[in-house]
């Protein structure tokens, strides 16, 4: 997956994104319904940054029981960006 700005991410097909990274991480600029929809449509997952300008989403996330989350060990792999 190429690292790029917002217009560039629209140019990539979902399959291209998922081939490169089954879990897509993005900064707050990409925390948008359309980006999430495109990733999920091709079977991917995402981790987005949420800031204060997304008030409803931020409030919903803060209300989740984070301390009860079960963390699975992460298998050792090579560098994330090759």
Image (spheres, helix red, strand yellow):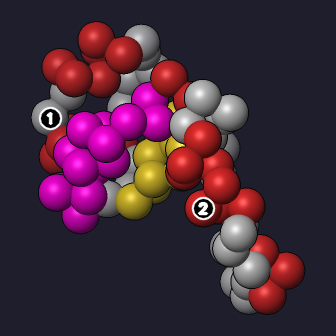
Residue of label 1: 13
Q: Secondary structure at mark 2?
A: helix
User: Crowdedness of circle 1 by 10 Å Cα count: few (<14), some, many (20+)?
Assistant: few
Residue 72 relative to residue 10: left or right:
right
Find out whether residue 15 is within the magenta segment.
no
Mark 2 vs 1, N-terminal side: 1
Q: Secondary structure at mark 1?
A: loop
Residue 20 relative to residue 24: left or right:
left
| Residue occupying image coordinates x 39% and y 59% | 45
Name the mark nearer the viewer: 2 or 1. 2
Picture coordinates of residue 5, whole percent (x, y)? 42, 12
Residue 35 visible in the snapshot = yes
User: Crowdedness of circle 2 by 10 Å Cα count: few (<14), some, many (20+)?
Assistant: few
Residue of label 2: 60
| Residue occupying image coordinates x 29% and y 14% | 8
Find out whether residue 39 is within the magenta segment.
yes
Quadrant holding the N terminus: top left
Picture coordinates of residue 2, whole percent (x, y)? 38, 23
Residue stretch rendered in magenta on the structure? 30-43
| Residue occupying image coordinates x 31% and y 42% | 33
Residue 17 visible in the snapshot = no
| Residue occupying image coordinates x 74% and y 88% | 70
**Relative to the observer, which residue lies in front, 68 or 22?**
68
């Amino acid at each position: 997956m190429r690292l790029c700005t917002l217009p560039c991410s629209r140019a990539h097909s979902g399959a291209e994104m998922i081939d490169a990274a089954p879990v897509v991480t993005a900064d707050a600029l990409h925390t948008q319904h359309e980006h999430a929809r495109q990733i999920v449509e091709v079977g991917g997952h995402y981790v987005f940054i949420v800031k204060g300008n997304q008030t409803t989403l931020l409030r919903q996330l803060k209300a989740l029981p984070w301390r009860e989350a079960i963390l699975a060990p992460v298998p050792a792999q090579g560098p994330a960006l090759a």
